[in-house]
Amino acid sequence: MDIRVTNTKNRLVEALLTCLEEKSVYELKVKDIIEVSGVSTRTFYQYYADVNSLVADVENDFIEGYKDSIRRDRESLANIDMTLPTQDQLKAVLSATKNTISYCFDHKREIQLLLSDNGDIRFYNLIFDTSCDEFFERINSMDDSQGIKLTGKERIAMLIDVQVFINSMIDLVRVLLNYSDRLSPYDMRENIMAFLHKTPLYELTSFLKKDKKSSNKNSVD
């Protein structure tokens, strides 16, 4: 991409974030972005149709980078032994957050403002849906998850646990980013580790272990 295009887009993105410090995204006008960014009206419309298209571009760019970071983290989870103590499993899960936490750390301003009261609910939903998809992708990639059979009630319970877990993790990261001037990415991962001990992840682990024991019993019989 032409450096001039990149610079102009960066100015518009920065202007959007600055405006969100004072106004709701639903109250913003093109003239607000133009005034803060210093670009002309003509230049703005060369790139975006309106404020909504600018917001969508910022959100979609973030999600693409987010997907890339969690995809790079995913590989280290492929061979987690579900028979290990939960503490050891959680350590493995924690080690697979390095790229994702670093990415969130580097993009904390977008996260904090787009998830604030002045932000856009679509952004939250994009993160939530992407995180849920990744959670199940990681579960499916674990060797001990193959062939898991759950009853209807167990499946519903698992889905509820996962959704509660993802919502909780998003909120946790938001809170931790508020202390990013005092917490390093490593400190954030340590806090996440402590949090994992209190989440429905234990319930999910119990589902996997229960089904594995059941499968082993059936094979013996």
Image: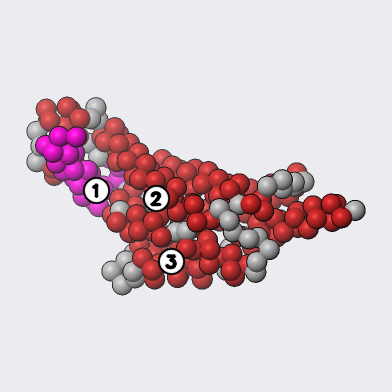
Amino acid type, label 1:
Leu
What's the CA distance linking mark 1 and mark 2? 23 Å
Outermost residue, right side: 221
Answer above or below: position of 129 versus 199: above
Residue 17: which disc? 1
Residue 69: which disc? 2
Residue 74 in view (yes/no): yes
Mark 1 burial class by Cα count in 10 Å: few <14, some 14-19, many 20+ = many
Which residue, given by chain and number where applicable, does mark 3 sit on? Answer: 189
Answer above or below: position of 194 versus 137: below
Looking at the image, do the residues carrying marks 3 and 1 touch, with CB atoms under 8 Å apart? no
Secondary structure of the magenta portion, mostly? helix
Mark 3 or mark 1: name the one nearer the start of the chain.
1
Amino acid type, label 3:
Arg
Mark 2 burial class by Cα count in 10 Å: few <14, some 14-19, many 20+ = some
Answer above or below: position of 91 versus 29: below
The x, y position of residue 40, in whole percent, is: 9, 33
Span shown in magenta: 1-27
Q: Classify the position of the N terminus by image quarter.
A: top left
Answer above or below: position of 47 versus 109: above
Judged left or right of residue 171, residue 82 is right
